[in-house]
Image: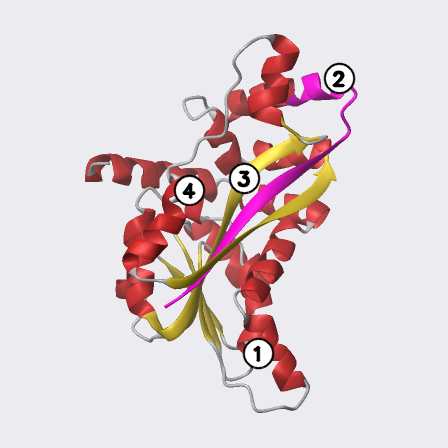
Amino acid sequence: MDQSKIEAIKKAIRTNFDASPDNYDEFERNTSLFTNLTVELAMESGMAESVARSAMGERPRPGLRIADVGCGTGISSLILKNFAGPDGLVTGIDISPNMLEHARKKAAGAKNLRFIEGDAAKLGELLSEKQDVVLYNACIFLLPDAERSVRAAYVLLADGGVIGMNFIYGSYVAGRELFTELFPYWTNEEYPIPKFPCDVTTLEGMLDDIGFRDIHTGIAEKVMTLNNLKRFYSVPAQSASLYPKLAYDQRLEAVEKMFRLAEEKGIRDASMKWKWIVARK
């Protein structure tokens, strides 16, 4: 992808996320999705083991330096500071100033936590200190130059440091994918499928090529009501994955129409699957 296209995508992403903080926070209040994803990714990254050893008095736990890439409204950063410990430091990084404004308000008075506005592809310019952990919680799929960011993370990580990421792996009703299976089956028509700038199928190979080791993966399924799944795809930043060429009010109307069809089919519950990948330098 040429640089001009990458920059155009980033500009659109920034605009959409600048319009999304309140929607994301409302969605999180109803589902706790990002809270749960953060905790699970932290645990898979080995941070929970470190906390447990410290709590059991086995040995003092050194503070962890954690880069929270794509921190959004700060949901993940506030959780990660508990894993970092009193001597650690969590740095939340996001391209959207409006998302960061919400994050800073939530974190007012919090210690060992800071936020930086910046491009995930330029981690080496944003951070000078080596990091123990670099996490991409619910954001790697949004990066048009993900490889550049992951390569920067490799350089930034201390030896033995951990990289973790997760991404949408589908939306399901009774085991069937909503966008690729059910909507076309119900209507005999093509329906938009969420599309993101990063080809997530390349991530494991990318990590291996860059030099990461001990690559582990898994799938987490998050059950929610159909209405909450609609809330997710009604967020300005997420509705753009379905209808990128429409204005937001038009996207909202189209999403409403899609999910009304599912409701008419008697669907009330759904789930999202998220794939996680963890590796070590």
As for residue 207 lying within the magenta part, the answer is: no
What residue does disc 4 label?
200
Q: Picture quarter containing residue 15?
A: top left
Amino acid on which disc 4 is placed: Val
Label 2 vs 4, first from the N-terminus: 4
Instruction: Classify 10 Å Cα crowding around label 3: few (below 14), some (14-19), many (20 and above).
Output: some
- Circle 3/circle 1 CB separation < 8 Å: no
What residue does disc 1 label?
50
Which numbered tag is attached to residue 265? 2
Q: Position of residue 210 (x, y in %)?
A: 29, 58
Q: Quadrant of the C terminus?
A: bottom left
Q: Secondary structure at mark 3?
A: strand
Cα gap from disc 2 to disc 4, whole angstroms: 31 Å
Numbered disc in front, either 2 or 1: 1
Q: Position of residue 75 (x, y in %)?
A: 58, 58
- Front residue (pair 139, 93): 139
Which numbered tag is attached to residue 224? none
Q: Secondary structure at mark 4?
A: helix
Instruction: Classify 10 Å Cα crowding around label 4: few (below 14), some (14-19), many (20 and above).
Output: some
Label 2 vs 1, first from the N-terminus: 1
What residue does disc 3 label?
169
Instruction: Classify 10 Å Cα crowding around label 2: few (below 14), some (14-19), many (20 and above).
Output: few
Q: Secondary structure at mark 1?
A: helix
Q: Secondary structure at mark 2?
A: loop
- The reply to whether residue 107 is visible in this rendering is no
Label 3 vs 2, first from the N-terminus: 3
Label 3 vs 1, first from the N-terminus: 1
Residue placed at 61% from the left, 59% from the top?
Answer: 40
Q: What's drawn in magenta, residue-wise? A: 259-281
- Front residue (pair 47, 87): 47
